[in-house]
């Protein structure tokens, strides 16, 4: 792992990476776990209860990386659509496993109330390498737009856009880890030829609301539900979490659409990004998965209660 005091081992400080350096970075990313075993096998089992959709394959290895989603078997156009996404950043494990766990353990309760669409592992190349970026060193979570530079984002965008105006709630499941500070932010600075500025990793769960269309009651309801499962991140000495002002316990805001974040890809009135902290001494992997499931169910419950009809 890189540290804040050691130059990143690829490139020249102050100079953005060229094509050779981008390729060097990609070659150094080694497979560390199996998308087929961890995700596709579970999707196959869940396909006994849900409709499985293949919405693309990654050009980097089409046979290895089919992009798959699951949706309600009895899809009813009269019902509201609830969208759940995970693994936009492949290294954020509980987002992937939390989406799958929700389908297995909790989704049945909503069978006659909503249309569920769940893409549990948006970035399988990154999932296998426990990596934030895709194979071309592009962050999929800044790429949800037309003419996207990330195939992972472009494929999901194409799947969701016909439903864009009908999605009532979209929750995108993420993690913040210690490697954000030791690896991924230093890599970002090196890739872009910028100085690395150390930050602080928040200890606990938090949510990212939409600056452009904030929904404080929705976010407070999700935070209340998750607080029964795991601890909520507190503001730092500046009253911030990852450089953004805390607007309510465990809630910050980003301009989701402007930044082309996954949570901003629809017109859903209720949309958010979760962040758990698996490296906390106060939690573990199972607790993080449970927190994601609690967030999804609370988000759906709120949207159902407060949506017309």
Image (spheres, rainbow, N blue to C red):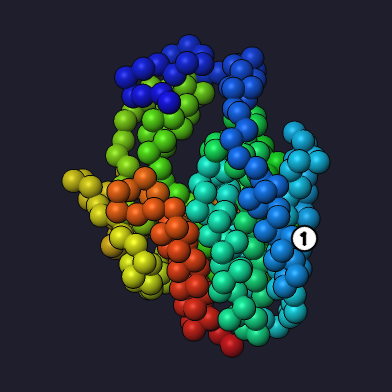
Indicate the secondary structure of the residue bearing disc 1. strand
- Expressed as whole percent of the image width and height from the top left, the position of residue 242 reads 34, 44
- Expressed as whole percent of the image width and height from the top left, the position of residue 81 reads 64, 73
Left or right side of 203 for 284: right
Left or right side of 281 for 76: right
Q: Residue furthest toward the top?
A: 12
- Expressed as whole percent of the image width and height from the top left, the position of residue 254 reads 43, 52
Q: Which residue is mark 1?
A: 53
Left or right side of 221 for 119: right
Q: Is residue 229 above or below residue 112?
A: above
Crowd rating for badge 1 (residues with CA inside 10 Å; few <14, some 14–19, many 20+): some
Can you tell which quarter of the image residue 170 is in? bottom right
Q: Name the quadrant of the C terminus.
A: bottom right
Can you tell which quarter of the image residue 279 is in? top left
Can you tell which quarter of the image residue 7 is in? top left
Residue at 55% x, 56% y: name it: 97
């Amino acid at each position: 792992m890189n540290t804040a005091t050691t130059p990143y081992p690829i490139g020249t400080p102050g100079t953005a990476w060229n094509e050779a350096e981008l390729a060097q970075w990609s070659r150094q990313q080694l497979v560390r776990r199996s998308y087929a075993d961890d995700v596709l096998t579970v999707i196959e089992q869940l396909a006994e209860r849900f409709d499985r959709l293949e919405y693309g394959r990654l050009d980097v290895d089409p046979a290895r990386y089919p992009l798959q989603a699951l949706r309600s078997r009895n899809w009813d156009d009269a019902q509201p659509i609830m969208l759940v996404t995970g693994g936009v950043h492949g290294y954020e494990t509980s987002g992937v496993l939390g989406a799958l766990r929700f389908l297995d353990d909790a989704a049945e309760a909503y069978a006659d109330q909503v249309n569920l669409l769940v893409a549990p592992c948006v970035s399988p190349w990154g999932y296998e390498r426990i990596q934030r970026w895709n194979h071309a060193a592009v962050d999929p979570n800044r790429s949800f737009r037309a003419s996207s530079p990330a195939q992972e984002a472009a494929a999901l965008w194409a799947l969701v856009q016909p439903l864009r105006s009908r999605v009532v709630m979209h929750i995108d499941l993420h993690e913040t880890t210690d490697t954000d500070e030791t690896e991924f932010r230093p890599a970002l600075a090196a890739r872009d030829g910028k100085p690395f500025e150390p930050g602080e990793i928040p200890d606990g769960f938090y949510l990212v609301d939409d600056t452009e269309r904030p929904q404080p009651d929705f976010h407070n309801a999700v935070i209340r539900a998750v607080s029964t499962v795991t601890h909520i991140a507190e503001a730092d000495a500046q009253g911030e979490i990852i450089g953004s002002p805390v607007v309510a316990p465990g809630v910050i805001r980003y301009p989701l659409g402007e930044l082309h974040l996954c949570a901003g890809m629809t017109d859903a009135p209720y949309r958010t990004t979760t962040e758990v902290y698996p490296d906390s001494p106060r939690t573990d992997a199972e607790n993080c998965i449970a927190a994601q499931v609690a967030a999804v169910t609370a988000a759906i419950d709120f949207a159902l209660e407060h949506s017309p009809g």
